[in-house]
Image (spheres, rainbow, N blue to C red):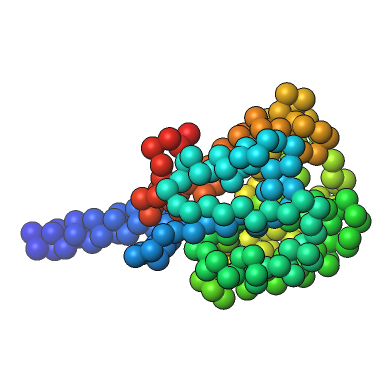
Amino acid sequence: MKKKSLIISGLITIILGAFVFFDRNPLKIELPKGRETVLVCFGDSLTAGIGAPEGKSYPDYLKNYLDVKIINKGVPGETASQGRKRLKKDVLSLDPDIVILEFGANDYFRKIASEKTKIHLEHMVDSLLDRGTVVFIAKFFPENSILSFIKSKDKKNYDEIYKELSSKDNVFLIEDIWGESWGTPKYMSDTVHPNEYGYEIMAEKYFKAVKDLFEYNNLLNENHP
């Protein structure tokens, strides 16, 4: 009887252990308590909200979904190199808990070698990680290879860069920020920028990617999708 009880106890322990293992979610990270949580959206025109009226960028829409302080530090036309130069002043000085990093489109359009873009992105990621910041990196191009503006060879190079950077602890890749908005006239203000409706879709894609982190820390707004 005693032997049977030990066997049953052992099985229960194994089952519970397996449940905990498979239930692991890398976004279940406890954010600092006792102060307002700060999220900085750092990037180029897709972060700044070019193509939409003021107050209709994706960070503006995110404010409706998350109970945190959201700061938009998007600058139109910037490359990863230019973002790196203002990282300390515009981002690190704010002591953010989370940063969404969105750079690369202007590097691509200006034909800057992806290897150079990687150097600047990695510097920014490592600088943020050194501060204990949780980092999300967003791909700037749509996943649909038929409609995408990026060539297959270049897409492969950027995919490798994003994959390598997101392999670091507390760095997470946002695979698709466009959803149905890319290439759909009613959601676009021009060939590369969304309009206010497109940015709303973009915000929902961002939200889906970060939701688990904020839910775990009880920081979701009741108005979230």
Please report the residue visible at 41 percent of the width from the left and 42 percent of the height from the top: 221
Q: Is residue 95 left or right of residue 67?
A: right
The quadrant the N terminus occupies is: bottom left
The residue sitting at the front extreme is 54
Residue 166 image offset from top left, x and y in percent: 63, 61
Is 204 located above or below residue 213 in the figure?
Answer: above
Q: Residue at x 78, y 64 (%)?
A: 82
Please identify the residue farthest to the bottom as the structure is shown.
Answer: 130
The answer to whether residue 72 of the structure is visible from this angle is yes
Tell me where residue 57 appears, x and y as whole percent. Answer: 64, 41
How many numbered circles are shown? 0
Whether residue 179 can be seen here: no
Residue in the picture at 75% in, 26% down: 184
Q: Looking at the image, is 90 positioned above or below residue 74?
A: below
Q: Position of residue 176 (x, y in %)?
A: 66, 43
Residue 124 horizontal side relative to residue 5, left or right: right
